[in-house]
Amino acid sequence: MYIVQIASECAPAIKAGGLGDVVYGLSQELEQRGHVVELVLPMYDNMRYDHIWGLHEAYRDLWVPWYDGAMHTSVFCGWIHGRLCFFIRPHSDENLFERGIYYGAPDDWKRFAFFSKAALEFLQQTNKRPDVIHCHDWQTGLVPVLLYEIYKWHGMADQRVCYTIHNFAHQGITSAEVLRATGLNNDEYYFAPDRLADNQYQGALNLMKGGIVYANHVNTVSPHHAWEARFSEVGCGLQPTLDTHHYKFGGILNGVDCEFWNPETDRYLLHPYNVATFERKAKNKFALQEHLLLAHDRPGHEKPLVCYIGRLDRQKGVHLVHHAIYYSLQRQAQFVLLGSATEAGIHQWFWHEKNHLNENPDCHLELGFNEELAHLIYAGADIIVVPSNYEPCGLTQTIGLRYGTVPVVRGVGGLLNTVFDYDYDEARLPQERNGFVFYQTDAPALESALGRALDLWFADREAFTNLAIAGMNYDYSWHNPGNQYEGVYEHIRHK
Ligand code: ADP
């Protein structure tokens, strides 16, 4: 098959979160299966150019219809670690992608509406006719709308669209101006409740809803999150739309890049290990303690090391992260946190805690983004906590499992599809259980699960090690998700 992914991120050159990882990982998997995959991305000024090879201007004069005229645009071509990418670069006074940011501008709707339009115009003018166009999140929700309302009439009637939602919290809610900008124009038609009218805000259009209504297949990034989005407030107002289109909606769990996240070959680790050499993990714990100036274990006085890695924001359950620090210390464990806050108030809160705990030999809080340290922590910790309020898929628990670091998670979204409780998951065989799960959002709930993990570590180290090894034995690669996306593509291309 010939597949074109139209997306606002592709790791590692353009990464704000899990979306970038998925676009890269899935493209790589599909190529390894023999499909032809190309990516269309915005040409941001702040992307990591050092991760792009052979960048050159491939199309100089792409005129993209825009408002009443056309926008002069260039398309650059290059490879992000082997993936063939086309970068859209408009020559506009508004500098749509030259702002030093990926997201967060007041006119984001315009930036990504233009990107969606330009991506299709590029395919149309260069005679690229993929079997499947795969687009992602609100930024490209207009792609299937434009395809079926405009480009179908310009030689693109056979193209089919798979639309993946990574985060329902951002939907691209905007005004009728987007219709004039992109040439859709007909307000009355698109403001219909079964087309793009927002389900909550009267007079507003919803680009993610457009993606759901018009795409041939829609999915989110785990089966449980798909259920939550359709039946609970996690759908952020899109529940009725998902319900109407339930026959084409599902969940496919993300994979992880098993080359990059592999304790056996991890370039950042001084002491690589695998299941057979699991005892070497202790050397990584020692190295981490040394690196962060934490106390070393003394014979007879060993301490488990609990960690948190991830963004510090409301989605991630920051209050429970905070509670986990003090609970772990109180239970004679060590705690390491690596996180970057998205709000000033949360940053100040954890900054204050960092200063407060600075002298504590059992605790280290690192604020900011640090890839290398993340690897050292995954390898050195015994337990990783992921107490999210909601989690479409979640990567940190899965990476933790790869590194034999036992996850303690809240039972939501993809966390529920990847972590199976050691004591209570009766649907799983004992050897399939790999962590600890709690459900409520309060401190006692977290303590109930983290407490059980710590109890096991202190009381029965062999059982704890077997649990960690059970997690390492799972297949969380892109193999299974690749199969499922392939199945979806096959299904829609014959419709
Ligand atoms: P998100 O909601 O942010 O996409 P995920 O769990 O899906 O959360 O993915 C988080 C990814 O970002 C993981 O690869 C994790 O290791 C990495 N990460 C998150 N915060 C940091 C940080 N402060 N430093 C280094 N890596 C981080």
Image (spheres, rainbow, N blue to C red):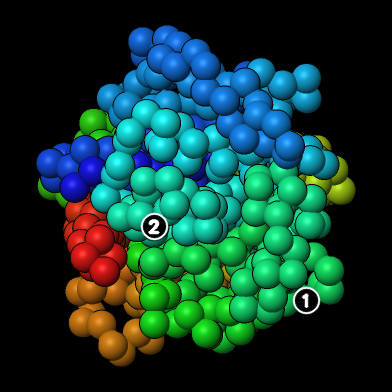
Image position of 81 with respect to 23: above or below: above
The residue positioned 62% from the left and 35% from the top of the image is: 65
Q: Provide the secondary structure element on which disc 2 rests.
A: strand
The crowd level at tag 2 (other Cα within 10 Å; few <14, some 14-19, many 20+) is many
Instruction: Give whichever of 181, 256 is nearer the camera.
Output: 181
Q: 233 or 240: nearer the eye?
A: 240
Alpha carbon separation for disc pair 1 and 2? 26 Å
Instruction: For marks 1 and 2, give the one nearer the viewer.
Output: 2
Q: Amino acid at mark 1?
A: Gln
Direction from residue 362 to residue 267 in the image, left or right: left
Residue 477 drawn at (x, y percent): 25, 51
Q: Are marks 1 and 2 in contact (CB under 8 Å)?
A: no
Which mark is first along the chain, 2 or 1? 2
Residue 226 place in picture, x, y as percent: 47, 75
Residue 301 visible = no
Residue 463, horizontal then vertical, whole percent: 27, 68
In the drawing, what numbered circle is on residue 452?
A: none
Which mark, residue 161?
2
Residue with the mark numbered 1: 200
Q: Residue 207 lies in what quarter of the image? A: bottom right
**Disc 1 element:** loop
Residue nearest the observer in this picture, 400 or 352: 400
The answer, for residue 233, to whether it is visible in the render is: yes
Relative vertical location of residue 252 with respect to residue 249 in this rendering, above or below: above
Indicate the amino acid at tag 2: Val
Picture coordinates of residue 189, whole percent (x, y): 68, 69
**In the picture, residue 298 is in which quadrant?**
top left
Q: Residue at x 22, y 58 (%)?
A: 486
* Whether the residue under disc 2 has CB within 8 Å of ligand 1: no
Q: Residue at 49% across / 36% down in the picture?
A: 121
